[in-house]
Protein backbone atom coordinates (compact mmCIF):
# COMPACT_ATOMS: atom_id res chain seq x y z
CA UNK A 1 0.00 0.00 0.00
CA UNK A 2 1.40 3.42 -1.04
CA UNK A 3 0.71 6.59 0.90
CA UNK A 4 1.35 10.25 0.02
CA UNK A 5 2.39 11.33 3.52
CA UNK A 6 3.65 8.11 5.13
CA UNK A 7 6.45 5.64 4.49
CA UNK A 8 5.94 2.02 5.47
CA UNK A 9 8.57 -0.61 6.26
CA UNK A 10 8.10 -4.23 7.21
CA UNK A 11 10.57 -5.92 9.56
CA UNK A 12 9.11 -9.38 10.10
CA UNK A 13 6.50 -9.08 12.82
CA UNK A 14 7.25 -5.37 13.27
CA UNK A 15 5.70 -2.74 10.99
CA UNK A 16 7.25 0.73 10.86
CA UNK A 17 5.09 3.72 9.97
CA UNK A 18 7.00 6.95 9.23
CA UNK A 19 5.36 10.36 9.10
CA UNK A 20 6.68 11.87 5.89
CA UNK A 21 6.03 15.50 4.95
CA UNK A 22 9.68 16.63 5.02
CA UNK A 23 9.05 20.08 3.49
CA UNK A 24 6.60 20.95 6.27
CA UNK A 25 8.46 19.40 9.24
CA UNK A 26 5.92 16.54 9.17
CA UNK A 27 3.12 18.97 10.09
CA UNK A 28 0.02 16.88 10.66
CA UNK A 29 -2.75 17.55 8.15
CA UNK A 30 -6.01 15.80 7.33
CA UNK A 31 -4.55 13.61 4.62
CA UNK A 32 -1.71 12.39 6.80
CA UNK A 33 -4.01 11.65 9.71
CA UNK A 34 -6.47 9.80 7.46
CA UNK A 35 -3.61 7.76 6.04
CA UNK A 36 -2.20 7.10 9.49
CA UNK A 37 -5.54 5.72 10.66
CA UNK A 38 -5.76 3.52 7.59
CA UNK A 39 -2.19 2.19 7.98
CA UNK A 40 -2.53 1.54 11.72
CA UNK A 41 -5.88 -0.22 11.34
CA UNK A 42 -4.43 -2.34 8.53
CA UNK A 43 -1.53 -3.53 10.69
CA UNK A 44 -3.80 -4.07 13.68
CA UNK A 45 -5.85 -6.46 11.56
CA UNK A 46 -2.81 -8.18 9.96
CA UNK A 47 -1.99 -11.47 11.70
CA UNK A 48 1.61 -11.23 10.41
CA UNK A 49 2.23 -8.07 12.49
CA UNK A 50 2.59 -8.08 16.29
CA UNK A 51 4.05 -4.62 16.98
CA UNK A 52 3.87 -1.23 15.25
CA UNK A 53 6.52 1.51 15.42
CA UNK A 54 5.37 5.07 14.75
CA UNK A 55 8.18 7.47 13.92
CA UNK A 56 9.16 10.46 11.81
CA UNK A 57 12.47 11.41 10.23
CA UNK A 58 15.86 11.86 11.88
CA UNK A 59 15.16 15.61 12.13
CA UNK A 60 11.53 15.72 13.18
CA UNK A 61 8.82 13.46 14.55
CA UNK A 62 6.19 16.13 13.83
CA UNK A 63 6.17 19.91 14.38
CA UNK A 64 2.48 19.94 15.24
CA UNK A 65 -0.81 20.39 13.49
CA UNK A 66 -0.46 22.02 10.07
CA UNK A 67 -0.61 25.75 10.82
CA UNK A 68 -0.97 26.65 7.12
CA UNK A 69 -4.06 24.44 6.89
CA UNK A 70 -5.53 25.74 10.19
CA UNK A 71 -4.80 29.44 9.91
CA UNK A 72 -8.07 30.37 8.17
CA UNK A 73 -10.31 27.88 9.98
CA UNK A 74 -13.40 29.32 11.64
CA UNK A 75 -15.24 27.87 14.61
CA UNK A 76 -17.71 26.43 12.10
CA UNK A 77 -14.88 24.47 10.50
CA UNK A 78 -13.62 23.08 13.78
CA UNK A 79 -16.46 22.23 16.19
CA UNK A 80 -19.13 21.01 13.72
CA UNK A 81 -16.37 19.55 11.53
CA UNK A 82 -14.93 17.73 14.57
CA UNK A 83 -11.37 18.87 13.81
CA UNK A 84 -8.87 16.55 15.54
CA UNK A 85 -11.63 14.17 16.71
CA UNK A 86 -12.44 13.21 13.13
CA UNK A 87 -9.11 11.55 12.36
CA UNK A 88 -6.35 12.07 14.96
CA UNK A 89 -7.38 9.47 17.52
CA UNK A 90 -7.56 6.27 15.44
CA UNK A 91 -4.31 5.33 17.15
CA UNK A 92 -6.15 5.04 20.47
CA UNK A 93 -8.25 2.19 19.03
CA UNK A 94 -5.23 0.14 17.96
CA UNK A 95 -5.05 -2.97 20.14
CA UNK A 96 -1.51 -4.14 19.34
CA UNK A 97 1.45 -2.34 20.96
CA UNK A 98 2.43 0.93 19.26
CA UNK A 99 5.95 2.11 20.11
CA UNK A 100 6.68 5.77 19.34
CA UNK A 101 10.23 6.64 18.29
CA UNK A 102 11.02 10.36 18.45
CA UNK A 103 14.06 11.94 16.79
CA UNK A 104 14.23 15.73 16.62
CA UNK A 105 11.14 17.83 17.25
CA UNK A 106 7.87 16.54 18.68
CA UNK A 107 5.96 19.79 19.11
CA UNK A 108 2.32 20.66 19.71
CA UNK A 109 0.17 18.06 18.02
CA UNK A 110 3.38 16.12 17.32
CA UNK A 111 4.04 15.75 21.04
CA UNK A 112 0.38 14.90 21.58
CA UNK A 113 0.45 12.21 18.89
CA UNK A 114 3.65 10.79 20.40
CA UNK A 115 1.94 10.65 23.81
CA UNK A 116 -0.88 8.56 22.28
CA UNK A 117 1.68 5.79 21.62
CA UNK A 118 2.03 3.07 24.26
CA UNK A 119 5.55 4.10 25.14
CA UNK A 120 8.24 6.32 23.72
CA UNK A 121 11.85 5.76 22.77
CA UNK A 122 13.81 8.93 22.02
CA UNK A 123 16.95 9.84 20.12
CA UNK A 124 19.37 12.02 22.05
CA UNK A 125 18.46 14.91 19.71
CA UNK A 126 14.74 14.75 20.60
CA UNK A 127 12.95 17.90 21.72
CA UNK A 128 9.44 17.85 23.14
CA UNK A 129 7.25 20.94 23.47
CA UNK A 130 3.73 22.30 23.53
CA UNK A 131 4.07 25.73 21.87
CA UNK A 132 0.38 26.15 20.96
CA UNK A 133 -0.03 29.22 23.19
CA UNK A 134 2.40 31.01 20.86
CA UNK A 135 0.03 30.50 17.93
CA UNK A 136 -2.91 31.64 20.04
CA UNK A 137 -4.65 28.38 20.90
CA UNK A 138 -4.69 25.71 23.58
CA UNK A 139 -3.44 22.25 22.70
CA UNK A 140 -6.22 20.30 21.00
CA UNK A 141 -5.17 16.65 20.99
CA UNK A 142 -4.72 15.91 24.66
CA UNK A 143 -1.64 17.98 25.58
CA UNK A 144 -3.20 19.47 28.70
CA UNK A 145 -4.31 15.99 29.81
CA UNK A 146 -1.63 13.46 28.83
CA UNK A 147 1.39 15.69 29.52
CA UNK A 148 0.61 16.27 33.24
CA UNK A 149 -0.21 12.57 33.63
CA UNK A 150 3.17 11.74 32.07
CA UNK A 151 5.48 14.27 33.73
CA UNK A 152 3.48 15.86 36.55
CA UNK A 153 1.62 19.15 36.86
CA UNK A 154 4.49 21.53 37.51
CA UNK A 155 6.64 20.48 34.54
CA UNK A 156 3.58 20.28 32.29
CA UNK A 157 2.35 23.76 33.26
CA UNK A 158 5.85 25.11 32.69
CA UNK A 159 6.02 23.61 29.19
CA UNK A 160 2.46 24.56 28.25
CA UNK A 161 2.59 28.14 29.56
CA UNK A 162 6.15 29.12 28.61
CA UNK A 163 6.54 26.86 25.52
CA UNK A 164 9.87 25.67 26.93
CA UNK A 165 11.04 22.54 25.11
CA UNK A 166 12.53 19.67 27.04
CA UNK A 167 15.37 17.58 25.64
CA UNK A 168 15.67 13.80 25.58
CA UNK A 169 17.51 13.63 28.92
CA UNK A 170 14.80 15.64 30.71
CA UNK A 171 12.10 13.64 28.92
CA UNK A 172 13.62 10.41 30.22
CA UNK A 173 14.17 11.83 33.72
CA UNK A 174 10.54 12.92 33.94
CA UNK A 175 9.12 9.67 32.56
CA UNK A 176 7.84 10.99 29.23
CA UNK A 177 10.09 8.52 27.41
CA UNK A 178 11.29 5.12 28.52
CA UNK A 179 14.72 4.99 26.86
CA UNK A 180 17.14 7.29 25.00
CA UNK A 181 19.66 6.19 22.36
CA UNK A 182 22.19 8.06 20.19
CA UNK A 183 20.40 9.49 17.15
CA UNK A 184 22.31 7.32 14.66
CA UNK A 185 21.41 4.14 16.54
CA UNK A 186 17.87 4.86 17.74
CA UNK A 187 15.99 3.03 14.96
CA UNK A 188 18.13 -0.11 15.27
CA UNK A 189 17.68 -0.07 19.04
CA UNK A 190 13.93 0.59 18.78
CA UNK A 191 13.58 -2.23 16.26
CA UNK A 192 15.36 -4.56 18.70
CA UNK A 193 12.93 -3.51 21.45
CA UNK A 194 9.95 -4.03 19.13
CA UNK A 195 11.29 -7.41 17.94
CA UNK A 196 11.61 -8.52 21.57
CA UNK A 197 7.96 -7.61 22.17
CA UNK A 198 7.00 -9.29 18.89
CA UNK A 199 8.36 -12.61 20.22
CA UNK A 200 5.88 -12.49 23.10
CA UNK A 201 2.32 -13.78 22.70
CA UNK A 202 0.52 -10.95 20.93
CA UNK A 203 -2.77 -11.79 22.66
CA UNK A 204 -1.16 -11.19 26.08
CA UNK A 205 0.56 -8.01 24.85
CA UNK A 206 -2.87 -6.74 23.78
CA UNK A 207 -4.34 -7.59 27.19
CA UNK A 208 -1.50 -5.83 29.02
CA UNK A 209 -1.98 -2.73 26.88
CA UNK A 210 -5.72 -2.80 27.52
CA UNK A 211 -5.23 -3.22 31.29
CA UNK A 212 -2.55 -0.50 31.60
CA UNK A 213 -4.72 1.96 29.68
CA UNK A 214 -7.61 1.02 32.00
CA UNK A 215 -5.50 2.32 34.91
CA UNK A 216 -5.96 5.85 33.59
CA UNK A 217 -9.74 5.54 33.28
CA UNK A 218 -10.82 3.86 36.51
CA UNK A 219 -10.19 3.33 40.23
CA UNK A 220 -7.38 1.11 41.52
CA UNK A 221 -9.80 -1.57 42.78
CA UNK A 222 -11.67 -1.72 39.47
CA UNK A 223 -8.41 -1.70 37.52
CA UNK A 224 -7.00 -4.63 39.48
CA UNK A 225 -10.29 -6.52 39.02
CA UNK A 226 -10.04 -5.87 35.26
CA UNK A 227 -6.47 -7.19 35.25
CA UNK A 228 -7.50 -10.28 37.26
CA UNK A 229 -10.09 -11.23 34.60
CA UNK A 230 -7.34 -11.29 31.95
CA UNK A 231 -5.08 -13.28 34.28
CA UNK A 232 -7.76 -15.92 34.92
CA UNK A 233 -8.73 -16.05 31.23
CA UNK A 234 -5.05 -16.68 30.41
CA UNK A 235 -5.39 -20.21 31.81
CA UNK A 236 -7.66 -21.05 28.87
CA UNK A 237 -5.09 -20.01 26.25
CA UNK A 238 -2.26 -21.75 24.33
CA UNK A 239 0.13 -18.96 25.40
CA UNK A 240 -0.13 -19.94 29.08
CA UNK A 241 0.28 -23.65 28.28
CA UNK A 242 3.33 -22.99 26.07
CA UNK A 243 4.92 -20.34 28.32
CA UNK A 244 4.75 -22.35 31.53
CA UNK A 245 5.68 -25.67 29.85
CA UNK A 246 8.71 -24.02 28.20
CA UNK A 247 9.87 -22.64 31.56
CA UNK A 248 9.59 -26.04 33.24
CA UNK A 249 11.26 -27.80 30.31
CA UNK A 250 14.06 -25.19 30.33
CA UNK A 251 13.53 -24.23 26.66
CA UNK A 252 12.65 -21.05 24.78
CA UNK A 253 8.87 -20.64 24.35
CA UNK A 254 7.43 -20.48 20.84
CA UNK A 255 4.50 -18.08 20.91
CA UNK A 256 4.09 -17.90 17.14
CA UNK A 257 0.45 -17.20 16.29
CA UNK A 258 -0.55 -16.88 19.94
N1 LIG B 1 2.62 23.67 10.36
C1 LIG B 1 2.89 23.99 9.07
N2 LIG B 1 4.13 24.15 8.61
C2 LIG B 1 5.15 24.02 9.47
C3 LIG B 1 4.94 23.68 10.81
C4 LIG B 1 3.61 23.51 11.27
N3 LIG B 1 3.31 23.14 12.52
N4 LIG B 1 6.15 23.62 11.44
C5 LIG B 1 7.07 23.89 10.48
N5 LIG B 1 6.48 24.15 9.30
C6 LIG B 1 7.09 24.50 8.01
C7 LIG B 1 7.61 25.93 8.05
O1 LIG B 1 6.56 26.83 7.77
C8 LIG B 1 8.67 25.89 6.96
O2 LIG B 1 8.01 25.94 5.72
P1 LIG B 1 8.67 26.83 4.51
O3 LIG B 1 10.01 26.19 4.24
O4 LIG B 1 7.70 26.65 3.39
O5 LIG B 1 8.81 28.21 5.03
C9 LIG B 1 9.22 24.47 7.11
O6 LIG B 1 8.25 23.71 7.82
C10 LIG B 1 10.51 24.44 7.91
O7 LIG B 1 10.26 25.08 9.15
P2 LIG B 1 11.24 26.20 9.75
O8 LIG B 1 11.84 27.01 8.65
O9 LIG B 1 10.46 26.94 10.80
O10 LIG B 1 12.37 25.27 10.39
P3 LIG B 1 13.29 25.58 11.67
O11 LIG B 1 14.27 24.47 11.72
O12 LIG B 1 13.77 26.98 11.67
O13 LIG B 1 12.29 25.45 12.95
C11 LIG B 1 10.55 24.40 14.28
C12 LIG B 1 11.70 24.20 13.25
C13 LIG B 1 11.11 24.83 15.62
C14 LIG B 1 9.86 23.04 14.40
C15 LIG B 1 9.57 25.46 13.73
O14 LIG B 1 9.21 25.12 12.40
C16 LIG B 1 8.32 25.63 14.53
O15 LIG B 1 8.32 26.25 15.58
N6 LIG B 1 7.16 25.08 14.04
C17 LIG B 1 5.86 25.30 14.61
C18 LIG B 1 5.68 24.53 15.90
C19 LIG B 1 4.31 24.79 16.48
O16 LIG B 1 3.93 25.90 16.78
N7 LIG B 1 3.54 23.70 16.67
C20 LIG B 1 2.20 23.75 17.23
C21 LIG B 1 1.18 23.83 16.14
S1 LIG B 1 -0.45 24.06 16.78
C22 LIG B 1 -0.97 22.49 17.19
O17 LIG B 1 -0.23 21.52 17.10
C23 LIG B 1 -2.40 22.37 17.66
C24 LIG B 1 -2.73 21.11 18.38
O18 LIG B 1 -2.43 20.98 19.56
C25 LIG B 1 -3.47 20.03 17.73
Image (cartoon, rainbow, N blue to C red):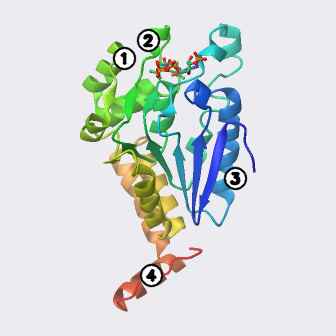
Residue 130 place in picture, x, y as percent:
42, 22
- Report which residue position mark 2 lands on: 133
Q: Depth check: 77 or 223 in front?
A: 77
- Report which residue position mark 4 lands on: 253
Q: Depth check: 91 or 65 in front?
A: 65
In this view, the mark in front (1 or 4): 1
Identify the mark at residue 42; answer none if there is no mark.
3
Identify the mark at residue 84; answer none if there is no mark.
none
Q: Residues within 10 Å of mark 1 (few under 14, many from 20)?
A: some
Q: Are marks 1 and 2 in contact (CB under 8 Å)?
A: yes
Residue 91 place in picture, x, y as percent:
58, 42
Q: Is residue 93 left or right of residue 213?
A: right
Return the disc, 3 or 1, that comes first in the chain's sequence. Answer: 3
- Report which residue position mark 1 lands on: 163
Could you tell me which secondary element the residue under label 1 belongs to? loop
Q: Residues within 10 Å of mark 3 (few under 14, many from 20)?
A: some
| CA gap, disc 4 and disc 2 | 51 Å
Q: Residues within 10 Å of mark 2 (few under 14, many from 20)?
A: some
Could you tell me which secondary element the residue under label 3 belongs to? helix
Residue 47 place in picture, x, y as percent:
66, 66
Could you tell me which secondary element the residue under label 2 belongs to? helix
Could you tell me which secondary element the residue under label 4 belongs to? loop
Return the disc, 3 or 2, that comes first in the chain's sequence. Answer: 3
Q: Depth check: 238 or 20 in front?
A: 20
Q: Is residue 142 above or below residue 117?
A: above
Residue 23 place in picture, x, y as percent:
61, 26
In this view, the mark in front (3 or 1): 1
| CA gap, disc 3 and disc 2 | 35 Å
Amino acid sequence: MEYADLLIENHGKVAVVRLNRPKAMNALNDNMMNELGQALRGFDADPAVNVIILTGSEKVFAAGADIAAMANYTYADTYPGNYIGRNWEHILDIRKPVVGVVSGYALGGGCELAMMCDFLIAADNAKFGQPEIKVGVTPGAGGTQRLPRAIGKSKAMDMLLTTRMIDAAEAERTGLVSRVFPADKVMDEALAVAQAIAQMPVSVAMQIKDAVNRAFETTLTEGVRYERRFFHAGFGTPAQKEGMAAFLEKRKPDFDGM
